[in-house]
Image (cartoon, rainbow, N blue to C red):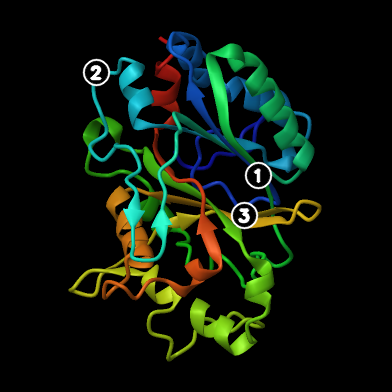
Amino acid sequence: MSSQQGDRVPIDPQSVEAPLSAFAVFLVVTVVPGGEDHVRNVIADVASITRAVGFRDLDGQLSCIVGIGSDAWSRFGQTGRPRQLHPFAEVQGRVHTAVSTPGDLLFHIRAQRADLCFEFERILLDKLGAAIAVEDEVQGFRYFDSRDLLGFVDGTENPTGRGMGEATLIADDPQFEGGSYVVVQKYLHDLESWNAQPTSIQEHIIGRSKADNVELDNAPGSHKDLATITDPDGTEHDILRDNMPFGRPGSGEFGTYFIGYAGDLSVIERMLQRMFVGEPAGAHDRILDFSTAVTGSAYFVPSLTLLESLGD
């Protein structure tokens, strides 16, 4: 699942390690009963759609990652099963809840041009036809210097180089090595309440300075602190975030689409437990007082070879 440079398409369609893009579409669908065989054949051929659209502008770096949910994997009749693949489990804290919502397939479509994402999605949905129902569709965009709509730089702690593969790729499940797990959540922001907070309070909640993105020395219980997973021996576990802001000023909807890739799904689950329940319990992530999770689902991302084999 490593990145590739080719003569026709610059990025492997299942490359978790593809570079951050200027635009993305996050598409979550469910498979209509009886549509399983048709859907399997379409997603097995996602590379051909990527080639057809991506060839129009190789510098556009079009890519698509397909994630398969727990129920869909079973309905696709596969003989083996990724060890950690299960439905997203709701996390209920005293104040806030990480909800679990329907999703059989996730399509994470990325490019440097919005029209490439649009054209890929249009063709994909046309091919899937009546075999699926769209549950959620979000168009994301890179906001200035990779900031979210809360005004802070997002994704600072992403692994780089060799660490990216170590964090994102499954290594201890032989049949599914080279794959990954991914969790997505759509968060809606109360920008009016957030913007009413003094910058110093915002910085303490996030755990970084707003202007220059410097980590604060004394911010226990901050978002950065709770989202960092460390074992008792000091080993820190990374995930790869490719979050994007989205919004519709006319309707007053503003948010962040969280997407996290990991070779060990439990790392993301521990992170959400710390954020919503708190550590200690009751001390939840204060960012949740201004940002509400309205969706939540988890998927297995097969290697491109495994994905293509689903059409056999």
For disc 2, the neighbor class at 10 Å (few under 14, some 14 to 19, many from 20) is few
Furthest-front residue in this view: 95
In front: label 3 or label 2: 3
Work out whether mark 3 precedes mark 1 in sequence or the reverse, and give the earlier one. 1
How many marks are shown on the rendered structure? 3
Q: Secondary structure at mark 1?
A: strand
The kind of residue on which mark 1 rests is Ala
Furthest-left residue in this view: 233
Which residue is drawn at the image coordinates 42% and 48% (left, top)?
A: 99
The quadrant of the rendering that contains the N terminus is top left
In the picture provided, is 146 more to the left or to the right than 249? left
Mark 3 to mark 2 CA distance (whole Å): 35 Å
The kind of residue on which mark 2 rests is Thr
Say whether marks 3 and 1 touch (CB < 8 Å): yes
Which x, y percent locates residue 211?
A: 67, 83
Query: What label sits on residue 244 in the rendered view?
Result: 3
Which residue is drawn at the image coordinates 69% and 28% (left, top)?
A: 120
Please give the residue where the numbered disc 2 appears in the rendered image. Answer: 79
Q: Where on the picture, by quarter, is residue 144?
A: bottom right
